[in-house]
Image (cartoon, helix red, strand yellow):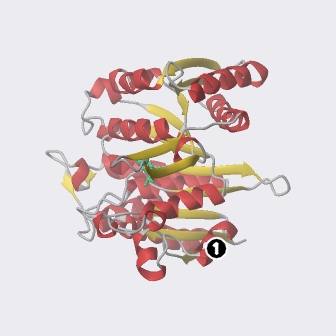
Amino acid sequence: MTRTLFLLPGDGIGPEAMAEVEKLISVMNADENAGFETATGLVGGSAYDEHGQAISEDDMARAMAADAVLFGAVGGPKWDGVPYEARPEAGLLRLRKDMELFANLRPAICYPALADSSSLKRDVVEGLDILIVRELTGGVYFGEPKDIIDLGNGQKRGIDTQVYDTFEIERISGVAFELARTRSNKVCSMEKRNVMKSGVLWNEVVTATHKARYSDVELTHMLADAGGMQLVRWPKQFDVIVTDNLFGDMLSDVAAMLTGSLGMLPSASLGAPNPRSGKRKALYEPVHGSAPDIAGRGIANPIAMIASFAMCLRYSFEMVAEADRLEKAIAGVLDDGLRTADLMSPGMTEVGTAAMGDAVVAKYRALAA
Ligand code: IPM
Ligand code: MG
């Protein structure tokens, strides 16, 4: 059995983090006959340098054809001056849009060993396990018109358009309700219905979807600003949060810090199941960015990237036992006191990117025994 993975390490710390996942892939192929076949492409600034665009047509086609895409990070000051259409982020947005990856799952789990690394108090974050379900192919990221127009009087006008259709809200809330049923059976929907028409519709459609198909799940609604406040006040009140593209972007960065470091948060971006094969298009990426300030120094935390691969095992390949084992391996190395610089605290052992990756691989193998 072959399982095809298309790797897009990208820019900054992306390639360093991806290298640690590649170690795991080799070990799984050798030890477990996992049958992963990998190919690597360019995205972001590195693609721009090579092709003059943030992802080439060739690499787009390879991403579309793979069983799953593993994505590192894009962007950096080096590409500040490139045309807007070719900026590094455009590669990621095109992948999301063309692959129709409308459901972005961002679990925020506070590993026991890291409860003191968060900027919040231990009792606030200890044992935290929440899931942000972010709509990923609509809203203000993609709405038209999107432009800067010259008003001719020395003034310009910047325009972005927040737009959501019923079906988009229905399908993302369906994903949130389904996932809630496998967890603590609670969904909190966040929007700004007090100022935005799209928020009014969002609220209506989530409520109707719940009533029609998921009334067994506990549903609450919160204004997104209040939701941000509640996320840092008492995050354990949440199980699944469902929200739009822009609010989901912001709230998931907030949630990342609850877990100790932005370097800890993985994500899965999923499309609808193919009606014939049942398979979903999927892309897995850490929530952290390219961190150009520390790129190339071998100190980046590879855990979010590795945990994204664990999500890939779970959601693209139904390798649930392997995914569980990999997540246990991550928790294990943290329990052993290993920390990359972003997580470092007194009494712990500071390690670099490669040593952290090696430790996770070793633990993963040990757990098989
Ligand atoms: C994220 C990132 C992206 C986003 C950027 C890189 C375009 O912040 O995945 O959260 O805004 O969606
Ligand atoms: Mg973001």
Residue 368 seen by the camera = no
Q: Which residue is mark 1?
A: 62
In the displayed structure, 327 sits above or below 130; it is below
Q: 33 left or right of 20?
A: right
Q: 8 left or right of 282?
A: left
Residue 60, image x, y percentages:
61, 70
Looking at this view, is 137 or 251 the one in front?
137
Residue 325 seen by the camera = yes
Q: Residues within 10 Å of mark 1 (few under 14, many from 20)?
A: some
What kind of residue is marked 1? Arg
Looking at this view, is 89 or 18 the one in front?
89
Q: Return the residue found at the far front.
A: 153
Looking at this view, is 102 or 332 the one in front?
102
Q: Return the residue found at the far left.
A: 346
Residue 346, image x, y percentages:
13, 45
- Mark 1, secondary structure of its residue: helix
Q: Which residue lies at the image location 45% right of the left edge and 20% below the top edge?
A: 237
Q: Which residue lies at the image location 45% right of the left edge and 42% below the top edge?
A: 249
Residue 254, image x, y percentages:
36, 36
Q: 249 left or right of 257?
A: right
